[in-house]
Structure formats: structure tokens, C-alpha cells
Image (cartoon, rainbow, N blue to C red):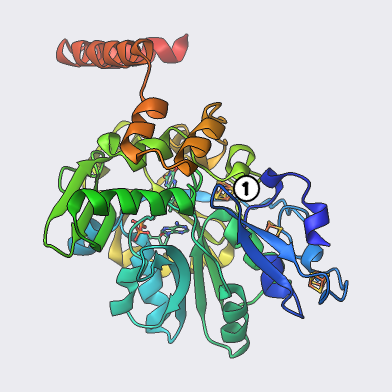
Amino acid sequence: MIDTKINEKKDCVGCYACANICPVNCISMISDREGFWYPKIDYDKCIKCGKCIDVCPTINHKTVKNKPVAYACINKDESIRLKSSSGGVFTLLAEQIIENGGVVFGAGFNENFEVVHSYVETKEELERFRGSKYVQSKIGETYKQVKNILELGRKVVFTGTPCQIAGLKTFLGKAYENLLCADIICHGVPSPEVWKKYIIYREEKAGSSTKRIAFRRKDEGWKRYSVSFIFKNDTEYRQIFRQDSYMRAFLKDICLRPSCYDCQFKTIYRQSDITLADFWGIQNILPEMDDDKGTSLVFVNSIAGQAMFEKLKDKILFNEVDINEAVKYNSAAIKSVKYNPKRIDFFNEINNGEPFDRLVKKYCTDSITTIVKMKSKILIYRLLKNTGLLSSAKKLLKKA
Ligand SMILES: Cc1cc2nc3c(=O)[nH]c(=O)nc-3n(C[C@H](O)[C@H](O)[C@H](O)COP(=O)(O)OP(=O)(O)OC[C@H]3O[C@@H](n4cnc5c(N)ncnc54)[C@H](O)[C@@H]3O)c2cc1C
Ligand code: SF4
Ligand code: SF4
Ligand code: SF4
């Protein structure tokens, strides 16, 4: 059964498709010591139907050959854009579905600030999904819910990581005209257990439990976003992402799911209809679309995606861009991150109760050589910019 087919942890993305399909509900998704979910089968109940193997998106990997078209986009509604991680396109497509009587699935916090997938039916409730949460989201029973709603003939938009979209598609097993899938460019997902430990650490520091969390506040700009915790005692913790210990651990790739270091879903040819992302590097490609309040990179991947994009056009500022040029600044679209060799030690120590900040200092601090290299790069860049030699230097580098 499925547990005998998944030889290595990296082969399971934790999408829950197997648990959703099992006709006798004998698959439980159990957290390992790193906090990632894997299927466990109750063999006393299993009827050996093999459905769990048939729906696994990593065993039955599908390659897609569509022709994605890429755009730089900005939601014209400034207030929504500021509340969104990138250019605020997610809210627009979700609203479009809701206006047509449909249902929106996405990742939001539950009452304990765990990240879970669920669905909403009103525009007011979309706030739950708005904004990136840098933790693996639990799919739970949402694939079954999608199927039930689709069968009623209602429109559905399902948003998630590329592997979650792949899991949904294999689970459904056939195309539905009333389904639109939107994935993200995905760096990788950190462990829900590490996230839980970080919340405990922040709450201990604040002496209070949490009221609200945002990963991507834009008060100091989209490129210098900050993490914010608002506590029930009305205090706030806010820190630029580079200095926040959790974000440092995330971006140092020390606590990602094993599958994320060798991801099968990294490509510009997507299983989704639309892909949403940050348009990093927009200042070099279309500087007029960079006001540091957030610009989205959007791939339109299918006919259904194109039809949706047409409906959004009067609500966005947009420009078509060369997709290969755009992903040059967003390698997470096509390339897995490198395995961090200190990962196992990090998990061992975090499980032994080492304080969060001390661990991050120990495992995620750049070496002196890296810091010197980074600072020299910034100095050279500023020097070339101030002396007006930046564009000639760029041309020379292109020729080299
Ligand atoms: C774990 C993770 C890694 C990412 N890595 C990159 C990257 O490397 N490069 C890049 O350009 N963009 C990345 N993104 C996407 C980016 O941060 C924005 O989510 C995306 O651009 C959409 O922004 P928006 O302004 O349109 O809407 P927003 O309102 O900001 O987007 C919210 C959308 O993100 C979904 N979402 C939020 N958290 C999760 C989660 N944990 N799992 C699944 N779906 C989630 C919601 O369901 C909703 O659809 C990542 C997002 C996540 C969650
Ligand atoms: S073989 Fe069938 S019954 Fe057994 S775990 Fe898989 S889906 Fe469930
Ligand atoms: S279906 Fe999803 S959760 Fe189940 S084994 Fe495959 S990848 Fe893992
Ligand atoms: S990096 Fe790949 S395996 Fe990891 S969450 Fe993203 S899509 Fe899934």
C-alpha cells in the first residue's frame, strides 16, 4: 500500500490525497519528529484496493506541456494590495469566483495559529487566506469537500502549493469545467512543529498569547517586509524579515519538508490554471511597475486561466513579460533549494528544547566571508550607481 511505495521521506509531499481517497478511512496522517505529516495505514481495516497508490501525485507524476504567458500585475485597489503579500491578485480572482456563487479554498490560520486549508463563501471571509503563511498548510479533508462542491455544479477556486494542486488533481481523477486551480511559486514549506515552537517562544517573550500574526507587513516597503505578532496584552513584535529568527531559519532552508529539496513540481509548465508570485526583480525589468508596494508575477497557464485573467483586466495594471526573464529573479519557480547540511542537527537541538533564538544564531548566521562578500557587492553596486556607470557595467556583464 502507499506506505510501502514511499521509500524515502522526500518522496511524500504530505498532500493528503491518499487519506482523502481511502474508502474505509484507514489512512491517518501522522507527524514525524520534524513535524511533517506522512500516511500511516491501519492494516486491520485496509481492503487493499490500491486507490491510495493511484492518487499519489509523486508516484503518478504528470508532466504538462502548456504555453504559459507571464505578466507583471498590480491590483488597482491600493488597500487590498497593501494587505496582500505581492500585488494582490489572489483577492481579485477569489472575488470573481464568489461573485458567481462559487467557493474559495486556501490556507489560513486556525484559532491556534496552525496553518490549515479550508473554504470560504463571502468576500469578507477572504481575509483568512490573504497573505502568505510560511508554514506547510494542512490539507485535511478539503479535497473531498472540493469534489462534493464541484459535483453540485458550483464554481471552485483552489489555491495552494504546486504539490497540493497536483494532489487535488490526481484525487479528482478527471477535469471539471467549474474548477480553477491557482498555485504559487513555492520556495518550500517549513515544519509546522518549528512554527509552533516559534509561536511559544514569541509568546513567552511577550508574556501574552497571540491575537494576530502577519508574515508580510509592508510598512517599510514590499522588499523590506516585516513579520508582526500582535498579542492579547496589546503589545506588538515587529521585525524586518532578515532579522526575524523564524524567517531566517526559513530562508536558510534549515527546516523545510524533505520533498522541498528535490521538488518534482518546479517548472514553468504548471498543472494549475494560474500561478501567483512575487515579481522579484521588477525594478530591472519594468521599473515603472515598481513602487515598492508589491507587484505580482502571474503565469496564465491554461484556457481557463486565460478566461479568468480576461475578467480581471479592468481591475489591474498589467504588462506582459518574457517568462524566462522573469524567473531569472525567482529561481524558486524552476529550481529546488539546496539541502542545508546542518538541518539534522537543527532538528535534534530544537527537539531537545534549545531556545529558538539561540538555535537560529548558531545555525543560521552567515559566515564572516559571506557577510564580507555581500557587503562588497552592495558597495560596488552603490559606487557604480552613483557614478552613472551601472548600465555600462550591466552591458559588459551580459556580453561576458
Ligand atoms: C510557503 C510559501 C513559499 C513561497 N515562495 C515564493 C517564492 O519563492 N517566490 C515567489 O515569488 N513567491 C512565493 N510565494 C508566493 C507569494 O508569497 C504570494 O503568496 C503570492 O505572490 C500571492 O500573493 P498575492 O498578493 O496575489 O495574494 P495574497 O493574498 O498574499 O496570497 C494569499 C494566497 O496564498 C495562499 N497561501 C498562503 N499561505 C499558504 C501556504 N502555507 N500554503 C499554501 N498556500 C498558501 C493562500 O491560500 C492565498 O491563495 C510563496 C508563498 C508561500 C505560502
Ligand atoms: S489500499 Fe485502499 S483501503 Fe488500503 S489504505 Fe489504500 S486506499 Fe485505503
Ligand atoms: S498521496 Fe500525498 S500524502 Fe499520500 S503518500 Fe503521496 S504525496 Fe504523501
Ligand atoms: S517546494 Fe515543492 S514539494 Fe515543497 S511544498 Fe513547494 S511544491 Fe511542494
Q: For this rendering, which residue is in front, 385 or 129?
A: 129
The residue at the far bottom in this view is 152
Residue 157 visible? The answer is yes
Q: Percent from the top left, x then y, of residue 63?
A: 72, 51
Q: Percent from the top left, x then y, of residue 369?
A: 37, 10
On screen, residue 125 above or below 302: below
Q: Quadrant of residue 375?
A: top left
Q: Is the residue marked 1 within 8 Å of ligand 4, measured from its CB?
A: yes
* Quarter occupied by the N terminus: bottom right
Q: For this rendering, which residue is in front, 240 or 229?
A: 229
User: Which residue carries the number 1 mark?
Assistant: 265
The residue at the far right in this view is 48
At horizontal 53% and vertical 29% (from top left) the residue drawn is 340
Q: Kindly state the secondary structure of the residue where label 1 is placed.
A: loop
At horizontal 61% and vertical 85% (from top left) the residue drawn is 148
Q: Percent from the top left, x then y, of residue 65?
A: 68, 50
